[in-house]
Image: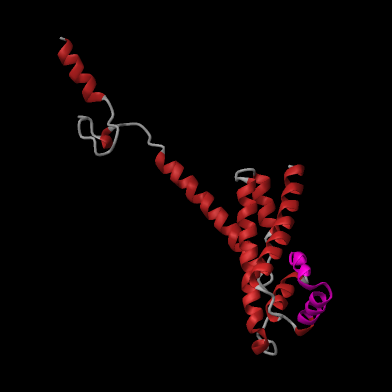
Amino acid sequence: MPGVAGRQSDRIRAPHHPTDHTCKIRPWRVARHHPAPIRTGRQLTAFCAYAGLFLSALVAATILPAQSEAVLAVMLASKAYSALLLLAVASAGNVLGAVINWFLGREVRRFAGRRWFPVTPAALQSASKWYHRYGRWSLLASWLPVVGDPLTVVAGVLREPFWSFLVLVTIGKTARYAVLGWIVLSWT
């Protein structure tokens, strides 16, 4: 009976789409594993890892004391994530932190003498001297540990134009992460 066999094969074929109701077998009765939840879980884990790197880099670039290089190095060494995407995420977070500093610098004169203000007058003065000596090109050194963050604040205080600030800081901070990435990837 060719007609009956044809109908049976129609019954056991899986639907092409969840709204395809031509199949007689219900999807919840199929005893096979559906890979979508695992893929979604991995995507969520990767998103959280990239978000953590972004926040780490953002906080590290503000006037708050933090480090993002270790987070980036561990993520690169794990080789579980795209190196270029890690570089882009860390650089974006770090540059955004520097932009926050620049905006704070625009208003710093009002708050510089307050006890709670995290930049000491000595660090601000040192960064100011550095900035006056080398001008806007000193922003290429905004990645330096001690003087880099106050340097971005001073750029705001001295009214450095935003677009030149953004370009120079992006070059400096991305180059630092690129060198760190090259070192980590060449050792692992």
SS assignment for the magenta stretch, majority: helix
Q: Position of residue 74 (x, y in %)?
A: 67, 51
The picture quadrant where one finds residue 119 is bottom right
Q: Is 72 placed above or below 59 here?
A: above
At a point 57% along the width and 58% down the height, the residue shown is 52
Q: Quadrant of the N terminus?
A: top left
On the rendered structure, is 95 left or right of 123? left
On the rendered structure, is 114 left or right of 129? left
Comparing 12 with 30, the one in front is 12
Q: Position of residue 73 (x, y in %)?
A: 69, 52
Whether the magenta-drawn stretch holds residue 131 is answered as yes
Q: Position of residue 116 (x, y in %)?
A: 65, 85
Looking at the image, can residue 170 be seen?
yes
At a point 67% along the width and 89% down the height, the residue shown is 114
Whether the magenta-drawn stretch holds residue 135 is answered as yes
The picture quadrant where one finds residue 37 is top left
What's drawn in magenta, residue-wise? 123-145
Q: Is 28 placed above or below 147 here?
A: above
On the rendered structure, is 39 left or right of 77? left
Report how many numbered discs are placed on residues in the image: 0
Q: Is 53 placed above or below 6 here?
A: below
At a point 64% along the width and 68% down the height, the residue shown is 163
Q: Position of residue 138 (x, y in %)?
A: 78, 69
The picture quadrant where one finds residue 118 is bottom right
Q: Quadrant of the C terminus?
A: top right
